[in-house]
Image (cartoon, helix red, strand yellow):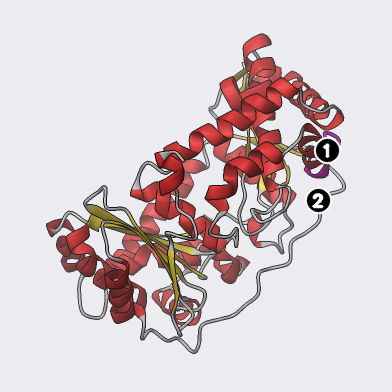
Amino acid sequence: MSAFAASIPKESNINRVEFDNGMVLLVYENRAVESVNITASLHAGSIYEGPERSGLASLAASALLTGTEDRSFDEIHASLENIGAELSMRGHIHKLGLFGKALAEDLRPLMETASEALRYPSFPSEHVERLRGERLTWLQYSSFDTRYRAGKAMRQALYPASHPYHYGTYGDEGTIGGITKADLSAFHARHMGPGGMIMVIVGDVDTQDAVRLVGETLGDWRNPEQSQVARADFPDAPSVTERQTVFVPGKTQCDISMGALGPARGAADYLAAQIANSVLGEFGMMGRIGKSVREEQGLAYYAYSHLGGGHGPDPWIVSAGVNPDHVDKAIDSILAEIERLVSEAVSDEDLADNQSYFTGRLPLRLESNEGISSQIHAMESYKLGLNYLAEYKDMIYRISGDDVLKAAQRYLDPKNMVIAVAGPAPDSAG
């Protein structure tokens, strides 16, 4: 057995503890480093906020570290800087994510600060307004970014207005402007709690010490008001495709975003779909799309495909940046490659190359505490099993060309793709 295979995180060396308040802790001891990393999540994402408060969850997450009942913004961040620690929180669609890093000897103050911010935020008005201003500036800037505008238009066309994926986690200028300090406090009271919380600690730490510390800082956390709202129902793929066109004044390039509903991370054919995506627009110089659209035809500045994979059906996206005169030809060329992917099995050589690429990059993802903690968190969050990484290579090599074809056919249809284009109006393209 290789050294990597022996040390890979798995059920035998990941210590998993369930607390009676609903929180799950996973600890992986990595004595090769002197630091420790924390990756955590709780059910406080944008799916719980509602369209009229779009952006509330992510704003609340960003504001947790701006002040607490006992400490000011300056005091919190001075204490972190004094020990060279990092701590951040960010709102996502389904969950709030927490990330921390410190020397192993400073795990306690890092955990104490994280606990204080999660449990007793004060949302000071001056910092809420600062964050609101930064958010509004970012949204205004993004309105002139053709890649952002194309992606937003595609997502809004792919998901109905009743679906939380229709909206960006950052909200928009109208909703962000109306969010109050009271809204942040109410969201915290209802949605932030230990129920369903996952925490991963990786580094130079003793498991029992870590369990004891988490118990002391978060074990008594209770929130009887914590919402148990079920995940939203997800729509079927759209049956009618209409091109979305967004005109952005002063631009000379068009950006294309094409999308379809992809698999959730826990889907049985997710890995097969990942290989299909790699063949289409990732492996090498951005797969078949990069080779055809950018290299051979010279139609795009960039062209690639991306498959997400979260708790729900993230979009399977093809993106390209092109000259306005080449938009239609680039779209036709991309659709031709999608048609090829769903109509014929990948060659044995292509399959083997991509399988080698997938298994070869796994050790790179486990080179750091951050990478290890992220992978362990994903295994727990998506219910993949704690032996997922140990079995990953075998799972990849069990995927056949027929599996890849079936996955592509299930999620992609060149006649049923949402297509969005953002760029200059026709009379200003020249």
Asked if labels 2 and 1 touch by Cβ distance under 8 angstroms, the answer is yes
Question: Which segment is the magenta one?
Answer: 410-415
Q: Using residue 244 as the reference point, say whether residue 4 is left or right of it.
A: left
Residue 234 point in image, percent of width and height: 74, 61
Assign the magenta stretch its main secondary structure. Answer: loop
Disc 2 element = loop
Q: Nearer the viewer, residue 305 or 326?
A: 305
- Residue denoted by label 1: 413
Looking at the picture, which amino acid does disc 1 mark? Answer: Asp
Disc 1 element = loop
- Residue denoted by label 2: 237
**What residue appears at the point 53 percent right and 56 percent down from the top-left corner?**
172
Is residue 211 placed above or below 87 in the rendered structure? Answer: below
Residue 345 lies in what quarter of the image? top right
Residue extending furthest toward the left: 82
Residue 71 point in image, percent of width and height: 20, 74
Whether residue 423 is visible to the viewer of this picture, yes or no, is no
